[in-house]
Amino acid sequence: MEQLIEKFRKRIALTQTNFVRSIISQINWEARLIALKGARGVGKTTLLLQYIKLRLLTELDTTLYVSLDNIWFTEHKLVDLVDQFVKKGGKYLFLDEVHKYPNWSIEIKNIYDDFPELKVVFTGSSLLEILNARADLSRRAVIYNMQGLSFREFLNIELRINLKSYSLEEIITSHGEISRDIISKLKPLQFFSSYLQNGYYPFYKEVPDLYHSRLEEVINMVLEIELPQLRSVNMGYIPKLKQLLYIVSESAPFTPNISKISERIGVNRETLLAYIFYMNEAHLLFSTYKDAKGITLLQKPDKIYLENTNLMYALKGLSVSVGNVRETFFANQLRYNHSIELAKKSDFFVDNKYTFEIGGKNKGKSQIEGLTDAYIALDDIEYGFENKIPLWIFGFLY
C-alpha cells in the first residue's frame, strides 16, 4: 500500500490546475459512488487528480488514488487494499481504469455495501458496462459521461481565459448578442480550424507535432485492447475493424451499403452491424438514424460519421471534405447533451424539435423553407442574422 501512496503523492505534485474541464462543477462529488466514463484520451485521469488537488489537498492522509492497471494488483486484491485503507482512516478513494481489473464490478459493489463511510469515484472506458455488469451498479452509482474538449474549452486553454457555455435555446434565440460578447474578447475564426484539426483531445498540448501519431495510437489501443477485452471481439477480426474504420473515413459522413461493405471486408451482415455499434460505443464512430428511438445492436445506421473532426484529420490528413468536417463538428458538439436524428429535408433534427442545415457562408435557405424551428449553421461567418447562425458558436454548448 505504501508503494501506491508514494506514486499517488508524486502524481498530485505534478498535476497542473491552470485549466480544469467544466464537468468538474457538474459532478455531485458528495455521492458515495461516482462513475466517470469516457473515450480514451479525453482527460478522465487528469480530472480526478485535479479534483483531489483543488478540493482535498488538506485531506491527503485520508485520500487515495490508484490506477487498477498498476502491476501491484497482479498480486493483491482491491477489496483487501480498501479494507486496509479504511482501517487507517481512509475516506476518499479514486479508482482509475477499472475495466483493467478482473471482476471490478463485483468488488466495487462489495466495497460500496461493506464500507458506507467511504466515498468512491471510479473511471472507465466509454465501453464500460455498468448496467449490465455482473454486479449491477446502476442503482448505486451516479454515472457521468465525459467528452473531448469543446471549442469553448479549447479557447480557454489556448488563451487562458474563462469563456462561459450557453444552452442550445440561448444560442438559437440570442446568437447575435452572444457572438458580439465573444468577439469583443477574441476572433473565434482565427482558432476554429486549429481546433477542428488538433484540439479535441486534451493531450494535444503535450507534443503538438506528434498529436496525430498519438491519436492513431489511441485508435489502435481501442481496437486492439478495449474492444477484445470489453466486447469480446476476436483478435483475428481486428484488421477487419481497422479496414472498416478506414472505409468510413474515406467518405464520412457515410451512407452505408451493408451488403457491399460486408463482402469487401469479409464478415457477415450481423457481425458488421455489431462492429459498427461497438465502434460507436468506443467513440470512434457516430451513427445517425432517421428515427433514433430504441436503437438496437443490429439496426442499420442511415449515415455514419467519425466521432470528431480530429479523427478525420488523423486518418485522412488534409484531404478531408470541408462539408463533412462541418457536419461532423456540429454533430459532435450537440450529441453530448442533445438527441440528433437525420432530418427528412435537411441535415439534422435535434431534440425532436429543431431542424438544422449545415453549410458554408453562401448556403441558401431552400432546404428549410416552410419548416418551423429551422436554422442554418454557417461556417466562415462571425455573426449570424435571424435563423442564420455561425457554426463555431455551437462549440459553446458545453
Image: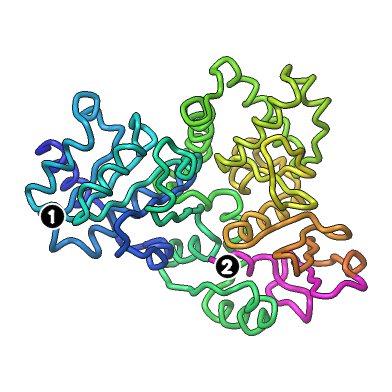
Taking the image as shown, residue 352 lies to the left or right of residue 315, namely: right
Frontmost of labels 2 and 1 is 1
State the image coordinates of residue 112 (x, y, percent, origin top left): 27, 49
Residue appearing at x 63%, y 79% in the figure: 170
Secondary structure category for the residue under label 2:
loop
State the image coordinates of residue 135 (x, y, percent, origin top left): 39, 39
Residue appearing at x 47%, y 47% in the figure: 38
Does residue 31 lie above or below 244 as drawn? Answer: below
Does residue 24 lie above or below 229 as drawn? Answer: below
Q: Does the residue at mark 2 contact the one at mark 1 (Cβ under 8 Å)?
A: no
State the image coordinates of residue 195 (x, y, percent, origin top left): 57, 55
State the image coordinates of residue 273 (x, y, percent, origin top left): 71, 32
- Specify the segment rendered in magenta: 369-398
**Viewer-proximal residue, 356 or 119?**
119
Q: Can you tell which quarter of the image residue 34 is in?
A: bottom left
Secondary structure category for the residue under label 1:
helix
Residue appearing at x 65%, y 21% in the figure: 240
In magenta stretch: residue 192: no
Q: Quadrant of the N terminus?
A: top left
**Viewer-proximal residue, 332 or 280?**
280
Residue appearing at x 51%, y 32% in the figure: 222
Residue that label 1 marks: 62
Taking the image as shown, residue 184 lies to the left or right of residue 262, namely: left
**Viewer-proximal residue, 291 or 25?**
291
Residue that label 2 marks: 397
Q: CA distance from mark 2 to mark 1?
A: 36 Å
In magenta stretch: residue 371: yes
Taking the image as shown, residue 93 lies to the left or right of residue 168, namely: left
